[in-house]
Image (cartoon, helix red, strand yellow):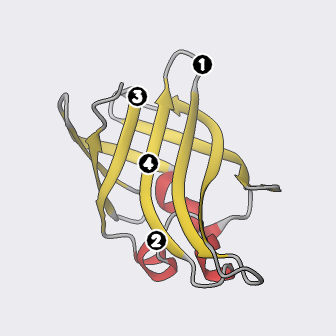
């Protein structure tokens, strides 16, 4: 289950309402969310949710792409359940504690319903379904 997984689908209402994992694009001029990935490092017990954000620089009007990263620890609470404890969200020069970050709740508990070498389907603590595809570069 380790490696990089791209979010292909979510039924999470909070993730869909905010348009992504962090909701940061709502604070950016012409902000849009690109790829959302989850990187799991089983050896170190860490997990990152990476979100590609594109936006325009107000003065110049130049489009820019940056990655927002929510990082924390991950642990198995049973054979099929993982708990992620996000510690911080970092975007560009901005770094914030993630303990009250509502949009990340969709990824904090994951009951794995299906897992093979290329696809992972999880159910969150509120019943939302997340479908992830394994990235080939791992």
Residue 109 spot, x, y in % from top left: 47, 49
Q: Is residue 21 visible?
A: yes
Mark closer to the chain start, 3 or 4: 3
Residue underneath mark 1: 44
Residue 64 spot, x, y in % from top left: 60, 66
Residue underneath mark 4: 37
**Gap in Å between the C-alphas at discs 2 and 1?**
27 Å
Mark closer to the chain start, 3 or 1: 3
Pointer 2 with pointer 3, Cβ within 8 A: no
Mark closer to the chain start, 2 or 3: 3
**Quarter of the view holding residue 29:** bottom right
Q: Is residue 125 visible?
A: no
**Gap in Å between the C-alphas at discs 2 and 3?**
22 Å
Which of discs 3 and 1 lies nearer the camera? The answer is 3
Quarter of the figure with the N terminus = top left
Q: Is residue 18 above or below residue 123?
A: below
Q: Is residue 14 left or right of residue 70?
A: left
Pointer 4 with pointer 1, Cβ within 8 A: no
Asked whether 132 or 55 is in front, the reply is 55
Mark closer to the chain start, 2 or 4: 2
Neighbourhood count class around disc 2 (C-alpha, 10 Å): few under 14, some 14–19, many 20 upward: many
Q: Is residue 95 above or below residue 77?
A: below
Asked whether 90 or 54 is in front, the reply is 54
Residue underneath mark 2: 15
Residue underneath mark 3: 3
């Amino acid at each position: 289950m380790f490696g990089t997984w791209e979010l292909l689908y979510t039924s999470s209402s909070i993730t869909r309402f905010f348009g992504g994992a962090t909701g940061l694009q709502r604070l950016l001029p012409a902000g849009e969310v690109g790829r959302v990935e989850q990187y799991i490092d089983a050896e170190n017990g860490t997990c990152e949710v990476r979100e590609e954000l594109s936006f325009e620089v107000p003065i110049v009007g130049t489009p820019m792409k940056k990655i927002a990263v929510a990082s924390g620890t991950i642990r198995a609470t049973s054979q099929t359940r993982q708990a992620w404890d996000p510690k911080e969200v970092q975007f560009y020069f901005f770094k914030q504690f993630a303990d009250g970050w509502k949009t990340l709740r969709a990824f904090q508990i994951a009951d794995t319903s299906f897992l093979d070498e290329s696809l992972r389907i999880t159910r969150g603590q509120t019943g939302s379904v997340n479908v992830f595809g394994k990235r080939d570069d791992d």
